Amino acid sequence: MRMDGKTAIVTGGGSGFGAGIARKFAAEGARVMVADINAEAAAAVASEIGGIAQATDVSSRESVQEMADVAIRSFGTVDILVNNAGITHLPAPLEEISEVEFDRVLSVNAKSVYLTALYLVPHMKDAGSGAILNVASTAGVSPRPRLNWYNASKGWMITATETMAVELAPFGIRVNALAPVAGETPLLASFLGQDTPEMRAKFLATIPIGRFSTPEDMGNAACYLCSDEASMVTGAILRVDGGRCI
């Protein structure tokens, strides 16, 4: 029960890594808001873990403000924020990605961190404590061809994590990031281009441990970084990648 008495928001919590993080937090005693653009998915996970669901578009200022307001009203305080929601574009030469795709990737993967900070950092400052976890990617650590603008958005998130950590440390707020390798999530087919046994085998050959990241892997890592056990850890980029970036 490492999170007994804590409250948390997990964006993109309706599936994949976000659902794994939400389940782990709840199992460790936290009260969790599952925020997701897919309201049905959010409701299903929230019902499973005894949390609350919130339909949220993390690229929309109004939607993020509503998410923060509902969480603060429901919980009284928000101790933990996990910026997990993310999207990608399909693999393609960088100059062939449309402006619409580029704008969407940066809005969901980067602007969302800015928007959640607008409405939750002041609350955490007032409380004198808080933990923010940004879910980046190995793509931001070791970029690969044909996912250029996705790579760049996750590199942005890593830099944002480090600068947020430095600025917010005096207020008792810790900011860290996870950098997972691809996993069994709704985005896997987009990362691979096409989800075939051959493409999976090719990708798995680049991971020394020999498997994808799982929602459980992410939940365990997130639980540590957001718990009081990590009270001296801020600005860390924890790779949950089976050795891929070595």
Image (cartoon, rainbow, N blue to C red):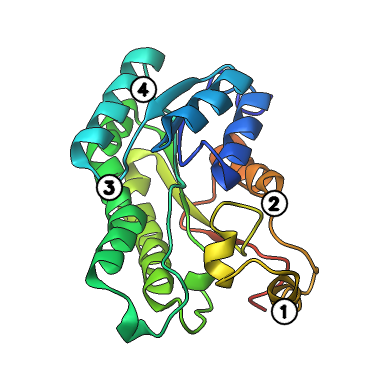
- Name which of mark 3 and mark 1 comes first in the sequence: 3
- Disc 4 vs disc 3: Cβ atoms closer than 8 Å? no
The residue type indicated by label 4 comes to Ala
- Disc 2 vs disc 4: Cβ atoms closer than 8 Å? no
Q: Where residue 51 sits: x, y (%)?
A: 53, 19
Q: Nearer the viewer, residue 226 or 137?
A: 137
Cα separation between marks 3 and 1: 33 Å
Residue lying at 63% horizontally and 40% vertically, measured from the top left:
20
Q: Is residue 153 left or right of residue 47?
A: left
- Disc 3 vs disc 1: Cβ atoms closer than 8 Å? no
Q: Is residue 59 left or right of residue 175?
A: left
- Name which of mark 4 and mark 3 comes first in the sequence: 3
Q: Does residue 230 sit above or below 94 in this rendering?
A: above
Q: Which residue is mark 3?
A: 59
Q: Which mark is residue 71?
A: 4
Cα separation between marks 2 and 4: 27 Å
Q: Quadrant of residue 164?
A: bottom left
Cα separation between marks 1 and 2: 18 Å
- Circle 2: element type: loop
Q: Which residue is mark 2?
A: 214
- Circle 3: element type: loop
